[in-house]
Image (cartoon, helix red, strand yellow):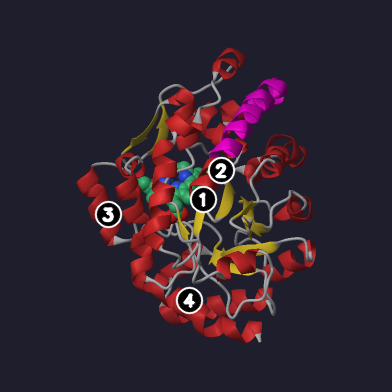
Amino acid sequence: MSSELHNDRLLRALLREPVDRTPVWIMRQAGRYLPEYRELRAQAGSFMSLCSNPALACEVTLQPLRRFPLDAAILFSDILTVPDAMGLGLYFEPGEGPRFERPVRDAAAIDALPVPDIGSELRYVTDAVSLIRRELAGQVPLIGFSGSPWTLATYMVEGASSKDFRHIKALAYDQPEVLERLLNKTAQAVTAYLNAQVEAGAQALMIFDTWGGALAHDAYERFSLRFARQIIEGLIRERDGRRIPVVFFTKGGGLWLEQIAGCGADALGVDWTLSLSEARRRVGDQVALQGNLDPSVLYASPHVIQAEVARVLAEFGHGSGHVFNLGHGVHPQIPPDHVAAMIEAVQAQSPAYHE
Ligand code: CP3
């Protein structure tokens, strides 16, 4: 595999090295807002049949790159493949989101969970990574990802998406050490899974802690951040002479930004609830920042999108260390033209911040 990378803006910005303009990619850039994705999913029959077939996962990964001049590809998969490989039985109820056949709610179920053998159970993911790397041919870097142990555990314990997290919060307060055993096991699986993605060709890694912001402040350190730190310490950080940057994203974690900045990641994802100027002031030179346009801005008209892009770029200000992104995933109802307007605006406006 040729390791020459033609566009390394993403990797450079994540390491706060100089760039000619701010790199841009979008969380959920491959997905339902694209008609070509909806068509392929209808043919394949389901979301999981796309994820579990490396050729289809590769095709979906590349779809947004054919439409837009993005600075990164992100593996098309899901965070819930890891608990699926631990035997929980993942399925998607149409229109309802993810479900597990066998949620784990007590010490007996948690202690019986295996740490999965990534090489066999998640081979379809690492095969997709190798294939995508080959097909990208150095056009842009490929981001691999996983969920954080806490975020994965919310699904593993609740058995589905939840608004109140009642089962996992009851467990956290009644039997914290049982929950810690689950998080520890999941952290081991996630570390092995991310390293397997790097070995297969992932050039940057992102850990999604989508539900970290649901924790009380001491509980955030105890049940989320600590395990993120543990994972990051165990990751392969260099490959083919290049550093593999790691992004850690706690949605709703703005209150704890200084604390999160010490987790060992090269960059932090930031949602839209705080300004990048404040975020930058609070983390200093410790980490780069990725974000943070409110995804709902993309419902507005292109001239508003341009103005909001201008605002986000100005909030970060001059110099490297910013990767433009939304503050969370793109919504399925967004017109692709509006995504194009956002990317064009970043390309047109950001060089001024790197002179
Ligand atoms: O960003 C990308 O383009 C890469 C692909 C990706 C998906 N899921 C594809 C997907 C990534 C990085 C994820 C991560 C993920 N999955 C997270 C963390 C990030 C976040 O969005 O908070 C979470 C919490 C999940 C769990 C998950 N997967 C949920 C709750 C759902 C259903 C809700 C929804 O958006 O429909 C999924 C399904 C899913 N994962 C879809 C896609 C494109 C939609 C499946 C479909 O119906 O086609």
The residue type indicated by label 2 comes to: Leu
Q: CA distance from mark 3 to mark 2?
A: 28 Å
Q: CA distance from mark 3 to mark 4?
A: 25 Å
**Quadrant placement of the C terminus:** bottom right
Residue 329: image x %, image y %? 48, 56
Residue 189: image x %, image y %? 57, 32
Q: Is residue 250 above or below residue 280?
A: above
Ranked by sequence position, the earlier of labels 1 and 2 is 1
Ranked by sequence position, the earlier of labels 3 and 4 is 3
The magenta stretch spans which residues? 169-193
Count of numbered tags:
4
Residue 160 seen anywhere in this rendered image of the structure: no
Ranked by sequence position, the earlier of labels 1 and 4 is 1
Question: Quadrant of residue 133 in the image?
Answer: bottom left
What residue would you read off at disc 3? 38
Ranked by sequence position, the earlier of labels 1 and 3 is 3
Disc 4, SS: helix
Tell me if 165 is positioned left or right of 18 in this view: left
What residue would you read off at disc 2? 194
- Residue 305: image tag: 4
Ranked by sequence position, the earlier of labels 3 and 2 is 3
Tags 1 and 2 touching, CB below 8 Å: yes
